[in-house]
Amino acid sequence: MDKMLSRLVVGYLAEQWPEYSLEFIEKHWCYGDMLFVCIAPGNKIVGTVAVDRKRFFPFISTVYVVPGYRMKGWARLLVDFGEVYVKHTGFKESRLWCDEKLVGMYTKMGYSFEKVEDGHHILVKSF
């Protein structure tokens, strides 16, 4: 991705999660951990999804949809894409963490509650 798009992605993510910077992203999504960016025609950023395996299980994370694209099914599409990547790497299940207010959305996508850890709800989905 070119530098302009990279800066836009970092800007969007930093609005949602202030600790995100280009350095943070490069440090946390490497060595098999991936951050995917969905781009619409005209180089318009739609959103992001990441898959990391730092906890020995693949976790879908950093599901972010640009405000103008919200409530149109993009979050589900991004999560589905993350799941395809997880399956492709040979895992039989995926986990994600989220705030309590998003548990219902992920439950509708087939995830089940596993536990609360560090104030976040951990959900799991078997394939």
Image: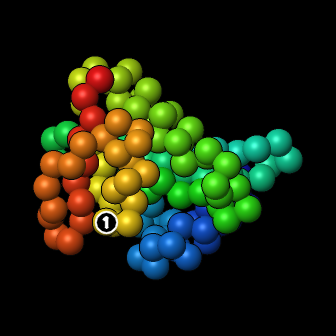
Q: Name the residue under label 1.
A: 100
**Corner quadrant of residue 88:** top left
Q: Is residue 68 above or below residue 112?
A: below
Front residue (pair 60, 113): 113
Q: Is mark 1 on a helix, strand or loop?
A: helix
Q: Residue 114, image x and y in percent?
A: 15, 48
Q: In which quarter of the image is the C terminus?
A: top left
Q: In this view, does 19 lie above or below 29?
A: below
Give the image location of residue 96, x and y in percent.
Answer: 30, 49
Residue drawn at (48%, 54%), measured in percent from left and top?
63
Percent x, y of residue 111: 30, 41
Where is residue 7? Give x, y as percent. 65, 66
Q: Nearer the viewer, residue 16 or 1?
A: 16
Q: Nearer the viewer, residue 1 or 46?
A: 46
The residue depicted at 61 percent of the width and 46 percent of the height is 74
103 sits left or right of 77 in the view: left
